[in-house]
Amino acid sequence: MNSKLVQILVDYVETAHFRSLKGVEEALAVNPGRFEQIAEMFLKWAVRARGEKWIPIMVDAFVSFSTDVNIAQVRYEADGHYPHKTLADCYEELYARKDSMSNYLWGVYLTNFLWAHHMELCLFFEDRFLTRLEDHARIVEIAPGHGGWGIWAISRLNDARLEGYDISSSSIKIARQLADSAGVKERARYIEKNALELPETADGSADACI
Ligand SMILES: C[S@@+](CC[C@H](N)C(=O)[O-])C[C@H]1O[C@@H](n2cnc3c(N)ncnc32)[C@H](O)[C@@H]1O
């Protein structure tokens, strides 16, 4: 591994969360060279925002998020429905809760490259989406969460601008921090808002949507 940050992450998974190592190896096997580049990019922004000590904290959050997803899947298959039925339930139980939402978002952030099927989405995003955008694209991001996808887009395009709408204040805070550490904060605007209530805008008011 050439990237020191990726090596720190893999070493920590191996020593502290051995049962998660197989999944990480599957993600790496999707495309080892590009896994390392993409993982380094996401880790670099997080480490600039929070320091190297943040890597194990993010990995713990990732393992806990992945476990929650697996348990939720089993419960769903047994019960035929999710425990939360409305957006208001999700908001009360998660999106508005600062501590658990922060953990959730950092966990999701790492799934971008540590889940093999998300790694495949990264390759699609880079090869099929980013390549079609002009340098001055105006991009809207719905529910950016941690913000990683939109930040990736505008960090590739010199003059692109991003507007992100998320219902959670924790998301807005983390996305702003990561945009700052990626050096694109002047071109990224995050607004705390229910995206289902966005007003209709004129045709052509954006070039792309994430
Ligand atoms: C799993 S995260 C997604 C993060 C990122 N988009 C990704 O794909 O990795 C889900 C995000 O959706 C936001 N969200 C859910 N419903 C929303 C709504 N109606 N309007 C705006 N944001 C919403 C949550 O606050 C959370 O930040």
Image (tube, helix red, strand yellow):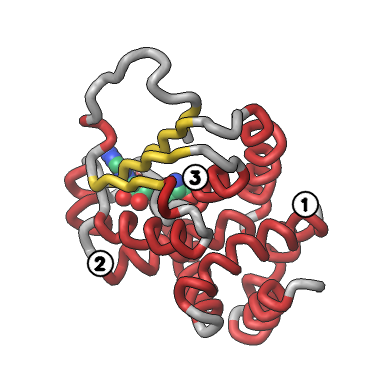
- Amino acid type indicated by mark 1: Val
The N terminus, quarter of image: bottom right
Visible in this render: residue 85?
yes
Name the outermost residue toward the top.
203
Q: Which mark is residue 30?
A: 1
Q: Which mark is residue 158?
A: none
Residue located beneath label 2 in the image: 98
Quadrant assignment, res 194 = top left
Taking depth in this image into account, of 207 and 72 the one nearest to the observer is 207
Q: Give left or right: position of 167 versus 62.
A: left
Local SS, label 3: helix
Q: Give left or right: position of 31 versus 18.
A: right
**Whole-percent x and y of residue 201?**
29, 19
- Amino acid type indicated by mark 3: Gly
Quadrant assignment, res 198 = top left
Q: Residues within 10 Å of mark 1 (few under 14, many from 20)?
A: some
x 23%, y 64%: residue: 97
